[in-house]
Amino acid sequence: MTLPGLPLELWEYPAVTRTNRRFRDTSLTAWDRIFLPGALRDLLPEPPLGPRRFIEDDNRSAIVPEPVAELDGLPFYLSVKGVGSSIDPYSWRPLDRWYGAELSRDPEVRTALRRRPPGADDRLITGERWLRGSPYGGQGAEHAEIALALSERADLTSLAGFRIAPVVKVAELPTRLSDQLRSIRWYRAYPGRFVQELRLVPSNVRVYFHARTTVGTAIGEVFDRFGLVREELATAFQARFLASAAPLLTLFARTMRAGPDGSDCRGIDFLDVWLDKDAVLAPDGTAYFVDLEGLEEVAVPRSAVHEKLEDQIFRSLYEVTFAYEQIEAERVRRFGAPEPRRERFLRLFRRAVAADPFLRLREDGPSVALEVRTKVDEPTLHLDFPLLDP
């Protein structure tokens, strides 16, 4: 399947990279690259290796529209994070090369950026400090290293059942170019190293934000793109979504370990990342978390473990339910066969968690609880979460 999207041409340059240890036995020297927008070509003294065709994705990412690998029996696509943004973060003004020249404190950069007129596909990596660990339009080493470390911790795409789009390489921008880009800023200079993340993603369909086609805004297009042409295919898609969403709700429990002195427990938590904008759906319905820089291990006192488990469920439960409802409404619109909302959800959720070692359903008449078991197998640390009330 070729991914649809707005075309974007980027230019390849050789780069020093760090490779995910899970992929070191794979020949990936052709990916020892950085991919830069045309607006930055005149900042580099050496010529590019050539152009590469991408499609736009999110604010600062691009995807090669043809599959480059197969993981989990699915096609995966090369996504590059940190290729520049086309919009001023503080207005709707296009972020083109001449605007970059206005912002730059470096006369050589200003001259280079003004050498050619702005193009319709201009975008820039800037030196504006953004989200603490990244420059606006680019990616910072601090965030990329977090994403790479989490990818290395996973079994390719699975972290105890929580699905990720793995970072395969982190490619470093040349020091001189980074210093030049640092001069293009509004208020605050990003002090770290400029890099790009090369990662594998199963699609460019997000739940609601940061994509042109999402479950929330174009569910009919999602059905068409993924070939959900029969009721049983739509139901299987829906069930796989729930099966992958359940680990997303319980990531801390799945990765939990006792602290060194036993007074606390440690597990992976979500910081400034969210299901609706930072995960994509594969053609089979599985949700893969893409933006890994906000997933970090945290420590909580043992007395606060229940609160952390509950908070993590509530954090994404609305987005899970929202996406499920969009899929269900489109299934009914196309194929009919509606059934009571509660009964159908429970039937599919039973199917979703049947083989999950961390989750059980306890049904007590009309009440249904989700029993969350932790990797530290102590009953006092387990949680009963009310999934369905009478």
Image (cartoon, rainbow, N blue to C red):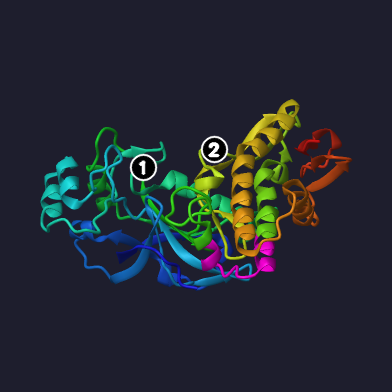
Q: Is residue 149 left or right of residue 378?
A: left
Compare marks 2 and 1 and give the one earlier in the sequence. 1
* Label 1 element class: loop
Q: Is residue 254 left or right of residue 296?
A: right
Disc assigned to residue 192: 1
Q: Type of residue at label 2?
A: Leu
- The image position of residue 283, as x and y in percent, is 58, 65
* Label 2 element class: loop
* CB contact under 8 Å: marks 2 and 1: no
- The image position of residue 361, as x and y in percent, is 82, 46
- In the picture of the structure, the residue carrying the numbered disc 2 is 271
Query: Vertical placement of 174 versus 130: above or below?
Result: below
| Residue extending furthest toward the right | 365
- Location of residue 367 (image quadrant): top right
* Neighbourhood count class around disc 1 (C-alpha, 10 Å): few under 14, some 14–19, many 20 upward: some
- The image position of residue 20, as x and y in percent, is 53, 60
Q: Main secondary structure of the magenta part?
A: helix
Residue drawn 37% across the image and 63% down it: 55
Q: CA distance from mark 2 to mark 1?
A: 20 Å
- The image position of residue 74, as x and y in percent, is 59, 69
Residue 24 belongs to the span the image colors magenta? no
Q: Nearer the viewer, residue 302 or 220?
A: 220
Residue drawn 18% across the image and 52% down it: 97
- Location of residue 128 (image quadrant): top left
Query: Vertical placement of 361 versus 306: above or below?
Result: below
Q: Which label sits in the foreground, 2 or 1?
A: 2
Region in magenta: 222-237
